[in-house]
Image (spheres, coloured by chain):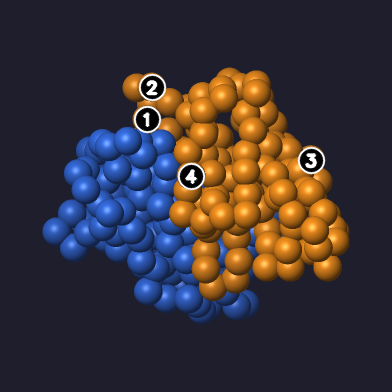
Chain colours: A orange, B blue
Amino acid sequence: DVKVTQSSRYLVKRTGEKVFLECVQDMDHENMFWYRQDPGLGLRLIYFSYDVKMKEKGDIPEGYSVSREKKERFSLILESASTNQTSMYLCASSGAGTGAYNEQFFGPGTRLTVL
Amino acid sequence: AQSVAQPEDQVNVAEGNPLTVKCTYSVSGNPYLFWYVQYPNRGLQFLLKYITGDNLVKGSYGFEAEFNKSQTSFHLKKPSALVSDSALYFCAVRADRGSTLGRLYFGRGTQLTVWP
């Protein structure tokens, strides 16, 4: 089974803290994605990556950065957490190449609360 | 630009009755379409996808979806709903061309409630 794991299920941080959310996949997928999910807004794409050390901005990159030093790991960084970043964060991965229509596989999510 | 609309925030249906969760899309080129389900405090689980071929696609847990190109729709259906089907459902579309080949565009989700 494809497995996407996220470092924490629940996280509480204070305003101004630097926050790291880690995501690891075990299927050798090229593509990795970070979304945030808020009630009534669905999933919004923050950043994605097609390869190691490559990244592209999604729809709401402001206040976030990412790092992909290894193929299996994709980190989301909140440089200075703010209360409006309280949300559910979902990581996903998918294969590439001729299987460009491959579905994305999701992790269990990290519910982040910024106080 | 790619986009997905799920016109109903909530769908309520009695157990044993058929259910439909609606989805319409807009995409440049041919669409690849997906349905996902999310149970409380969980990540999204893949249900089914349409790439090409038969317009009726069968997926997990007895769900199916019908692709209609003229109406740009991809409605999710199940002949007989179960209480355990109660969850949040997301429709997503991907374009078959362009620089953002890998990303999905999601609808806002439809909360399905099946009552006993």
Q: Are marks 2 and 4 on the same chain?
A: yes
**Residue that mark 2 sits on:** A97
Give the residue type at disc 1.
Ala
Label 4, on which residue?
Answer: A57
- Residue A74 is situated, as x and y percent measured from the top left of the image, at 64, 33
How far, Cα to Cα, is label 1 from label 3? 27 Å
Residue A7 bears which disc, if any? 3
| Residue at left offset 79%, top offset 40% | A7
| Nearest to viewer (mark 4 / mark 3) | 4
Residue depicted at 60% across the width and 78% down the height: B115
Residue A114 in the image: state x and y as whole percent. 79, 63
Coordinates of residue A107 in the picture (x, y in percent): 66, 43
Q: Nearer the viewer, residue B112 or B42?
A: B42
Q: Quadrant of residue A66?
A: top right
Label 3 and label 2: CA atoms lie apart by: 28 Å
Question: Where's residue B20, x and y in %?
Answer: 39, 68
| Left or right of residue B20: residue A21 | right
Q: Who's the residue at 78% across and 48% down the image?
A: A19
Of the image marks 3 and 2, the number of the one nearer the N terminus:
3
| Residue that sits furthest to the left in the current view | B70
Task: Confirm or deny contact between disc 2 and disc 1 (CB under 8 A).
Answer: yes
Q: CA distance from mark 2 to mark 4?
A: 21 Å
- The local secondary structure at tag 2 comes to helix
Element assignment for label 4: strand
| N-term mark: 4 or 3 | 3
Q: Quadrant of residue B71?
A: bottom left
